[in-house]
Structure formats: structure tokens, C-alpha cells
Amino acid sequence: MSYEYEATIRWTGNQGTGTSAYDAYSRDHVIEIDGKPPIAGSADPAFRGDPARHNPEELLLASLSACHMLWYLHLAAVNKIVVTAYVDRAQGFMEMPKGGVGHFTRAVLRPEVTISAGDAALAARLHGTASEHCFIANSVNFPVEHGPRIISDT
């Protein structure tokens, strides 16, 4: 089975002279997906981007974190672990050597999961399974680590 996804990225940063010079244009753009609210994007501020807008690096990290969470919630449900809260303060690490060709070296997911029923040890182990199943994590060429914290409110 295969799936197809579509997105439109529309540059909105022409300030009158296009890309006539490196500092003559804004990095602002809009990410559009049919039937969904647009996402205001830009470059990282280190690369002349607008800090009030989402940048591709943040969106990659958010995609990794959200994919992991969705798989984890599925696995928790089928293993009779009742999750009542989930928050992940993920971090991504990128290196930019001289020459300007940067790359992510790793991502670390730090989910804090509150459960009201089920085995806390199993709840912790399921993060490994979620990581193995995450479509996004399986698509990147850098390690995606996870250090979960399980809180039992029983």
C-alpha cells in the first residue's frame, strides 16, 4: 500500500526587487495544504528568517515528535495503558560546517507521559516500539533518540 501527500509552498518574500541581492528579499513563505489552515514559514533567524514564523528545521523536529507520539498513543491503547497527558520537549541538533552545507546530527525526544492505568514499565518500553514504527523517524538519516518519563497518577 502506498500513500501520496501534497503541499504547496508559496514564497511571499518579494520586497520589490526579488532576489536581486542576498539581503533584498524576505525568506517568508506560506505552507498550504488543501482544506487546512496555512502555516506561516520562514528561514531560521540565523539565516535571515523571521523569528515569529515556523522554520523548516523546527517543522522537521515537530514532525518527528508528532509521529512518535501518534504511534505511542496507538501502542498504549492496544496494550491497555491509559494515557491521560503527553508532552514532548524535543530537541534537534544541526551542524553547519564552513561552506554552508548543514545537516541534522540527531534528535532527542523527551516525552513526559501521564498514565492512569496499565504497567508503567511497559509504558516506558513502548517508546522503543513507537520509534521503530514512526514513518518520519524511518525516513531521516540521523539518529532519533528518546528519553521518556512515565508518571503514574494511580
Image (tube, grey):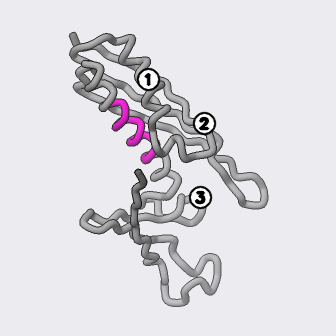
| Residues shaded magenta | 62-73
Q: Name the residue tied to disc 3.
A: 46
The answer to whether residue 121 is magenta is: no
Q: Name the residue tied to disc 1.
A: 148
Residue 126 picture quarter: top left
Residue 54: percent from left, percent from top: 43, 58
Q: What element carries label 1?
A: loop
Q: Name the residue tied to disc 2.
A: 143
Above or below for 73 versus 48: above
Compare marks 3 and 2 and give the one earlier in the sequence: 3
Residue 133 picture quarter: top left
Q: Is mark 3 on a helix, strand or loop?
A: helix
Q: Which residue is drawn at 26% across and 28% down?
A: 85
Residue 122 picture quarter: top left
Seen as rendered, the residue at the extreme front is: 1
Q: Amino acid under label 1?
A: Pro
Disc 1: CA contacts within 10 A as few (<14), some (14-19) or many (>=20): some
The answer to whether residue 70 is magenta is: yes
